[in-house]
Image (tube, rainbow, N blue to C red):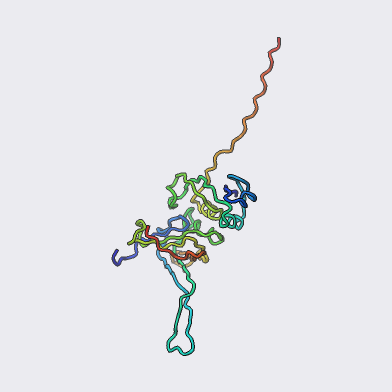
Amino acid sequence: MTNTYKATSVVGEHYFGEGVTEHDLSVVDERDALSGGHLVIVPRKYRVLSDNYSAGKQGDVVELALPRENEEALIQGGHLERVDPPKEIPAEPKPAAKKKED
Amino acid sequence: MAIFTLTDAMIIINGVTLSDHSNQVTITDSRDDKDVTAFGATSKASQKGLGDATMDIVLFQDFASGKTHATLSPLISSTTPVAVEVRPTSAARSATNPAALLSTALMFDYKMLDGSVGDVPTTTATFKNSGNAGMTYPTS
């Protein structure tokens, strides 16, 4: 599963791109980049599904910056689900109007 | 807080409150005992070595979503630290209700089932510190 990151060093920008980017990093790669100060996790929205998660009440939408294994544990545990914005689907081009024949 | 009976301990694992499924917790903050006794000594001498911090939490097993097994089982294969906090009572942290906090804990032991015939099945989870922070006792 991909996560959203922001590069915070020149090395980070070189390897991961400038600004906010989406990557499917391994656990080790993510940990190295975070602890090395090259990336930060960009918070994303989650819906709280359980009644015993401290970040919010059941049904709340909360913003969290979770490392991938912690996110997986909480999703697998039935505590959270991602609330990703709906993907933008480009509108289908309208058929050109027929010319009126004289 | 005077001497009290432990009836309302707060247990939060990876942000998930599991107090209502636990009936036993052991918090251990220790230092290695290093013997520095030299020739000529008449008594043993010890120095403190590296610190260690462990939390053993006994929970009633529950396979429902969001409960014991669903919360703990992903952590045994995970190598990313989580925070584990225990408080004497469910009240907010304070000087008289200090938390025991492993801010970077890894789960090293997960006994999915532990019990005999007729028992209520319990499970024991053991967390150890994975960084230099060790155990801390925040009051706010």
Instruction: Name which quarter of the figure residue A18 lies in.
Output: top right
Q: Is residue A66 above or below residue B54?
A: above
Residue B69: horizontal and vertical position, in percent?
50, 58
Number of marks drawn: 0
Residue furthest out toward the right = A102
Q: Looking at the figure, which quarter contains the N terminus of chain B? A: bottom left
Q: Is residue B27 above or below residue A76?
A: below
Which residue is painted at 55% across and 51% down in the image? A40
Residue B101: horizontal and vertical position, in percent?
43, 62
**Camera-nearest residue between B65 and B91:** B91
**Camera-nearest residue between B40 and B90:** B40
The reply, left or right, for residue A13 in relation to residue B65 is right
Q: Is residue B105 above or below residue A10?
A: below
Residue furthest out toward the front = A10
Q: Looking at the figure, which quarter contains the C terminus of chain B? A: bottom left
Residue furthest out toward the left = B2
Residue B76: horizontal and vertical position, in percent?
54, 62
Residue A21: horizontal and vertical position, in percent?
60, 45
Which residue is painted at 45% across and 55% down in the image? B16
Which residue is painted at 36% across and 58% down in the image? B93
